[in-house]
């Protein structure tokens, strides 16, 4: 949905709640963080900010890595999971925001997704 998150909001959140200040590593080169875009339009970063802040709040001493996949065009959820298998080292925890309703997916698509996600646990 083209959202960004705000690094300055992350720091303010960490300070407000006494959470250790840690940066977020973006695997896409940092193109999904922007204080300027968030200040210009809060709706452009509301959900993304919430995701970053609460991942940090739930595990304050963990390294947080953001993998953003734009689902425009021919990208789909299965492609995301397959790409995730190529991340080295694999993350210990994967939090997925913005999935798609299963009722719009075929049985084959759901089975492929389930099988690929199971490989992440090995």
Image: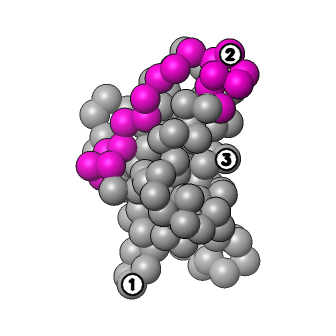
- What distance separates the C-alpha of mark 2 from that of mark 3? 17 Å
Region in magenta: 13-30
Q: Which residue is mark 3?
A: 50
For label 1, the SS is loop
Q: Quick one: quadrant of the N terminus?
A: bottom right
Left or right position of 96 against 73: right
Image depth: mark 2 or mark 3 in front = 2
The relative height of residue 98 versus residue 11 in the rendered view (above or below) is below
21 or 70: nearer the viewer: 21
Residue visible at 49% across and 70% down in the picture = 2
For marks 1 and 3 on the same chain, the one whose residue lies earlier in the sequence: 3
Main SS category, magenta section: loop
Residue 28 position, x and y percent, is 30, 52
Residue 105 position, x and y percent, is 62, 77
Image depth: mark 2 or mark 1 in front = 2
Residue visible at 51% across and 48% down in the picture = 6
Q: Which mark is residue 73?
A: 1
Q: Which residue is mark 2?
A: 18
For label 3, the SS is helix
Left or right position of 101 against 73: right
Is residue 81 visible in the rendered image? The answer is: no
Left or right position of 7 against 46: left
């Amino acid at each position: 949905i083209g959202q960004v998150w705000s690094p300055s909001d992350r720091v303010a959140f960490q300070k407000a709640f006494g959470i250790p200040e840690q940066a977020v590593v973006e695997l896409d080169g940092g193109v999904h963080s922007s204080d300027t875009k968030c200040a210009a339009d809060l709706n452009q970063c509301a959900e993304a900010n919430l995701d970053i802040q609460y991942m940090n709040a739930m595990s304050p001493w963990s390294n947080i890595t953001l993998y953003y996949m734009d689902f425009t065009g021919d990208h789909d959820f299965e492609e995301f999971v397959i790409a995730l298998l190529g991340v080295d080292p694999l993350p210990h925890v994967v939090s997925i925001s913005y999935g798609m309703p299963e009722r719009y997916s075929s049985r084959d698509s759901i089975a492929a997704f389930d099988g690929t996600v199971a490989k992440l646990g090995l």
